[in-house]
Image (tube, rainbow, N blue to C red):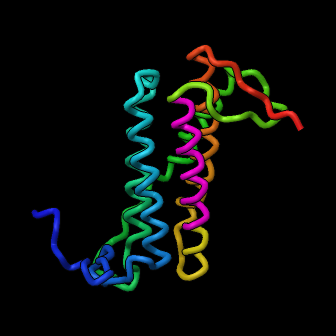
C-alpha cells in the first residue's frame, strides 16, 4: 500500500467506512488530536526513565488508537463495526494512578511543569490530552461519541499529570509550587 493517494489534495479525507469529509471537520479535529497524543505518548515511552512503564504506555497507545478509530468511524455505515477501547481501560488507568500516587507527597497547590525532560514531556502530553478531550466533547455536540472515550481521556490526563510528578521525583527534581 502506498503512503500517498493524492485523493486528499482537494482538502478532504476518508473516514472509516469510506465517506469523505473536509480536513477541517470537527470529527477530524477530534481524532487528529488523539493521533497527536499517541505520538506524545510514544515520545514518553522512549524515555529511559520509563523502562518499567513501557508496557503500560503501549497499552495506552493501543486504547488511543481504538478511540481514534471510533471517532473516525462513519456510524451511518452499518456494514462496518466500530472499534472501541478496552472496557477496562479507565479502571486500569485509575489503578496506575493510585499506585503512583502512593509514593508521592500530597499535593496542596499547583506545581510548575519543567522538572525533568521526561516529566515535561508528560506534562505536554497531558495538555494535548486535555485538548483532545475538548475536541471530542465538541464532536459530541454534533454526533454521538462513545462515553468510554471521554472518560478515558479525562482519566488519562490525570495519569499523565501524576506520571510527570513521579518522573520528576525519580530524576531528583524538586517540584516548584506555584505561590499565589
Q: Position of residue 61 (x, y in %)?
A: 40, 46
Please tell me which residue lies in front, 178 or 138: 178
Please, which residue is most extreme toward the top here? 172
| Left-right relation of 92 to 84 | right
At x 53% / y 80%, what residue is drawn? 143
The majority secondary structure of the magenta stretch comes to: helix
At x 56% / y 16%, what residue is drawn? 171
Q: Position of residue 68 (x, y in %)?
A: 41, 62
| Left-right relation of 180 to 78 | right
At x 50% / y 76%, what residue is drawn? 26
Residue 140 part of the magenta segment: no
Please, which residue is most extreme toward the left here? 1
* Span colored in magenta: 118-135
Q: Position of residue 161 (x, y in %)?
A: 63, 38
Q: Position of residue 22 (x, y in %)?
A: 38, 82
| Left-right relation of 103 to 17 | right
| Left-right relation of 1 to 76 | left
Q: Quadrant of the C terminus?
A: top right
At x 62% / y 53%, what residue is drawn? 154
Please tell me which residue lies in front, 165 or 87: 165
**The quadrant where residue 42 appears:** top left
Residue 126 part of the magenta segment: yes
Q: Quadrant of the N terminus?
A: bottom left
**The quadrant where residue 114 appears:** top right
- The answer to whether residue 20 is above or below residue 58 is below
Amino acid at each position: 500500500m502506498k503512503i500517498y493517494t493524492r485523493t486528499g489534495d482537494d482538502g478532504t479525507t476518508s473516514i472509516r467506512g469510506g465517506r469523505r469529509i473536509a480536513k477541517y471537520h470537527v470529527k477530524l479535529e477530534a481524532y487528529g488530536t488523539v493521533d497527536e497524543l499517541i505520538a506524545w505518548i510514544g515520545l514518553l515511552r522512549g524515555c529511559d526513565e520509563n523502562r518499567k512503564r513501557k508496557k503500560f504506555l503501549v497499552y495506552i497507545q493501543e486504547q488511543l488508537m481504538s478511540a481514534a478509530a471510533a471517532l473516525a468511524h462513519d456510524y451511518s455505515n452499518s456494514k462496518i463495526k466500530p472499534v472501541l477501547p478496552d472496557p477496562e481501560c479507565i479502571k486500569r488507568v485509575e489503578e496506575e494512578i493510585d499506585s503512583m500516587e502512593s509514593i508521592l507527597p500530597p499535593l496542596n497547590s499547583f506545581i510548575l511543569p519543567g522538572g525533568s525532560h521526561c516529566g515535561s514531556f508528560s506534562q505536554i502530553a497531558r495538555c494535548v490530552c486535555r485538548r483532545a478531550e475538548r475536541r471530542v466533547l465538541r464532536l459530541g455536540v454534533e454526533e454521538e461519541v462513545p462515553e468510554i472515550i471521554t472518560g478515558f481521556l479525562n482519566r488519562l490526563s490525570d495519569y499523565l499529570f501524576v506520571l510527570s510528578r513521579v518522573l520528576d521525583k525519580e530524576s531528583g527534581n524538586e517540584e516548584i509550587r506555584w505561590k499565589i
